[in-house]
Amino acid sequence: MKPQFTYEKMDRPEILSFMFQPRPDSGGTLAANAEDTFVEDGADKLHVRYYLTEDNEQPALLFFHGNGEIVGDYDDIAGAFNEHGVSFIAAEYRGYGLSSGTPTATNMINDAHLVFGAVTAKLQSLGFAGKFLVMGRSLGSAPAIDLAASYPDQIKGLLLDSAFAFTIPVLESVGVNVEATGLSEEDCFHNIDKIRTISLPTYMIHGQVDEIIKFNNATELQMESPALQKEFQAVPGTGHNNIFQVTGKMYFEVMMRFINRLGIMRKKKKGVR
């Protein structure tokens, strides 16, 4: 699919050094149902980790993490989604974890489409008959929103954790001298413009005292979303990086109530693939 927007004005060292903070995967023991795969693009390889449940008629969720995180940080969370019957598939950015290459804004959005194509093809080859969800946390909300806007016939729901409507305030929060760069919202991710085109069921969760992505930057997305089925969970007393630690199991229980209302869940079967 031809990109609606371009992002090369963000692809400058003085911006990228704040936007992306890649780190390697230190390794570790994977769960029995975890599988590492790679999507090749030229000389680079994009890491995708699958945690599939045994029931291929249950939904699968494609997840994009935040800046400074890697796929391996979500091993435990993947297990929690599996326990609720949802297959969890985590995508890695270039230069992060087990992926090669250099992360840029352009690469992140374009790679999301490469990964989406590879994931849907793999699931189809495995006889997957469930519905497809996409989720993004923080920086990962940009590729998640882009995919939801691009493939509304294939994606049945959008979930966002600590997402942003406008990019400039986020860049300023992490230390970018935006005035010196001459960057404007027209040069950025256009999350607010894309959300206006997304009528898919949409779930959002955000910390009320988020110090990086201010609360009102998230509520703008909620207000501009035309989805008839949408939900916004404000979490009192939480910042950008501690929502899950504060909410614990409730994080998944509330999210799963939303997913269950979509009518895409089958009665859970025991075991994993």
Image: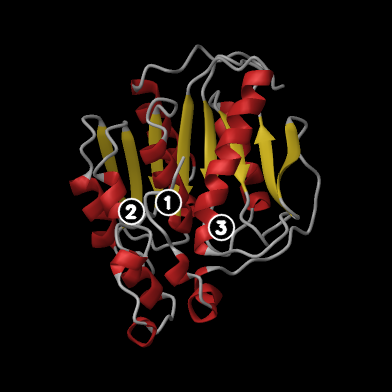
* Residue on which the image places disc 3: 107
Viewer-side residue, 94 vs 230: 94
Q: Which numbered marker is on residue 191?
A: 2
The C terminus lies in quadrant: top right
Q: Which numbered marker is on residue 94?
A: none
- Pointer 1 with pointer 2, Cβ within 8 A: yes
Judged left or right of residue 42, residue 123 is left
Q: Position of residue 124 (x, y in %)?
A: 62, 20
Residue 168 visible in image: yes
Dot 1 amino acid type: Ser
In the image, what residue occupies the spot 23% across and 61% down? 216
Q: Residue furthest bottom?
A: 180
Judged left or right of residue 92, residue 243 is left
Q: Residues within 10 Å of mark 3 (few under 14, many from 20)?
A: some
- Which of disc 3 and disc 2 is earlier in sequence? 3
* Residue on which the image places disc 1: 141
Q: Position of residue 149 (x, y in %)?
A: 36, 40
In the image, what residue occupies the spot 52% across and 33% down? 61
